[in-house]
Amino acid sequence: MSQPGTEMRALRQVVRDLVAEPVPSVDFDRMEDTLLRKLQCEPPRRARAPRTKAVWLAAAFAATAVAAAAVLGPRWASPESAPVGRGAPTQPAAAEEEVVQGDRLLVGQRLVTSAAPLRVEHPERASWTLAPHSSARLVRSGEQIAVELQFGALLASVAPSSRPESFAVEVGETHVAVHGTVFRVSRREETAHVEVLHGTVAVGARSEAARVWLLTAPATGRFSLDGRRLDTAELAKTAPRSVPRALPSARSAAGSDAVGSVGPHPSSEQDPEPLEPHPSGAELERALELLIEDVRDCFASHTQPSGNVVIQARSTLHVQVEPSGRVGQLTFDPPLSPAVRACAEERVAARRFPPSKLGARTGRLVLLTR
Amino acid sequence: MRLVGAGRPRTPAQQVGEAPSSRPEDSDLKAVIERARGGDSLAFRELFRRYRADVARLVHRMVGSGGDLDDLVQEVFLQVHRSIGDFRGQARFSTWLYRVAVNVVLMQRRAARSRPTFSYVEPATLDDKPLPDEQLARTLRIEAFYRLLDRISEKKRTVFILHELEGLVPADIARIVDAPVLTVRTRLFYARRELAGMMKDEPELCALIHQLESKDGEA
């Protein structure tokens, strides 16, 4: 009769044999094909990720830059916005555009274009076209699709969505989050250019919550790669052709520091240049800064102090600029007190933006403190 | 007590690293999982490629040579695809995957038990190729051992395979089979005892016991 210990040793021996036994060969490639074919007919249950506060904060704070428009097609390679532009075809639609399904891209995968643009489609969510001679990398997929523009330009069209930040473009630390608009981002050396042709986008540094620019189409903006807006200073210094067309007399009268004090516009007879369709981003930014200063003054003067308590209000200012340059509509979301609003409207009535053919819409999240 | 000592041959997964369930999940894997949860088919394919060998090995060990390995592995990944939205990352993905695999195999076994089977036992050659005696004996022992495994309860068999063959620790097994760790240890203890007690019922295993006793006697 065998000892129990022997049986256990025998068991151990058999287990060793079993562990060492090779697994029968499986044709994994064939299995993969079959599996993927089956999965095509069987949509997965998507993750039911709760919409967290963090997501909203990210949406609010991370936004940095871009917006552009449905009209973008023909303007894709305009000299102003072409990424690497000189050799690029002016009408990319005419070039042979390769189309890639977005769900086939891996996060981290880099796309580089040569002479032809590349279109990436995320069905029912967004599509984006990488301009010729550009490079982008898919940063995130799933709930949010995010693309990092490494160089060149891309045009994105985002389907309207109730989800926050359904699509974003990142250029350095600059982050542009939108849903339900079309926009273009281009990167030129160390700057990000944003053009909003339709809809509104919020632009800001990821790390700086209080500085968020709302660009409402039609609008453009230039940003550093850490999310700072550059238009005003840069245009004044390095791009004189982009300096507000209607302001030469104002500048000469008040000096370069006064460029921002957008005042009554000189008549068009003094300026042979035809009006642009919209004020430039720099012009809008300067005038908007002044408007915001007015609003801050009004808030300070019409909010009753209460001991040492600091009173703060956060509201998004939306401005509609008429072609004449005057402010046609001023709204706050959420609304400010009637007294502050009345004061702001009175002050704003005296302000003028540069005239343009079509006017503009712009906005900014403002933090008011008393 | 664990049956496998330091000299235990390592599984293919262990030969290239640790057992799947004990591998830390790197950020890359987390990103792939997250994308797969979002419906990214490419990410799912990546998961399939990473884990297919582990799943195949586990399924093979659970069903032996008589099961339809390909179909079961495929079914495991179909289930993973259907359920990955529920994976919250509270356990390691490999642990969750093993749980899915174990459930698929158990479901298949239950279904198989409920319908008539027509089996054909291969003659002892097992393969067309001639086998060396020792290799043949080992193969026969393994087949015999699978028959023993079939005789113990499903719960004990699962725990035994996961621990002794796959090298998982009781804590991980507890998550996979949804039972307390103490229960896992108890099942392991009884699985070993029952299997050891049944060894003599199979001629090939009985021969092994005698062989070991003879060696003991010579020593």
Image (cartoon, rainbow, N blue to C red):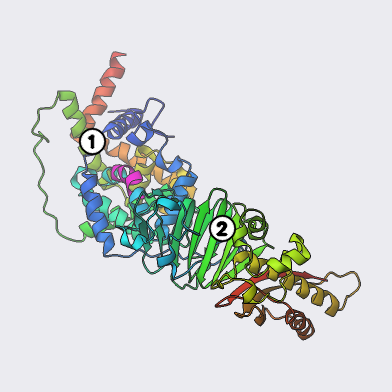
What segment is highlighted magenta in the picture?
B47-57
Mark 2 crowd level (few <14, some 14–19, many ≥20, 10 Å Cα): many
Could you say which quadrant of the image residue A214 lies in?
Answer: bottom right
In which quadrant is the C terminus of chain A drawn? bottom right
Amino acid under disc 2 = His
Q: CA distance from mark 2 to mark 1?
A: 60 Å
In x, y percent, where is residue A336?
Answer: 73, 80
Q: Is residue B2 left or right of residue A253?
A: left
> On what subunit does the disc labeled 1 rest?
B
Does A278 sit above or below residue B58?
A: below
Amino acid under disc 1 = Ile
Q: Residue at x 33, y 41 (%)?
A: B194
Q: Circle 1 sits on which residue?
A: B142
Q: Nearer the viewer, residue A243 or B24?
A: A243
In which quadrant is the N terminus of chain A drawn? top left
In x, y percent, where is residue A164?
Answer: 53, 68
In x, y percent, where is residue A34?
Answer: 22, 54
Q: Circle 2 sits on which residue?
A: A175
Q: Is residue B111 left or right of residue A103?
A: left
Q: Nearer the viewer, residue B38 or B121?
A: B38
Q: Is residue B139 magenta?
A: no
Q: Residue at x 22, y 43 (%)?
A: A26
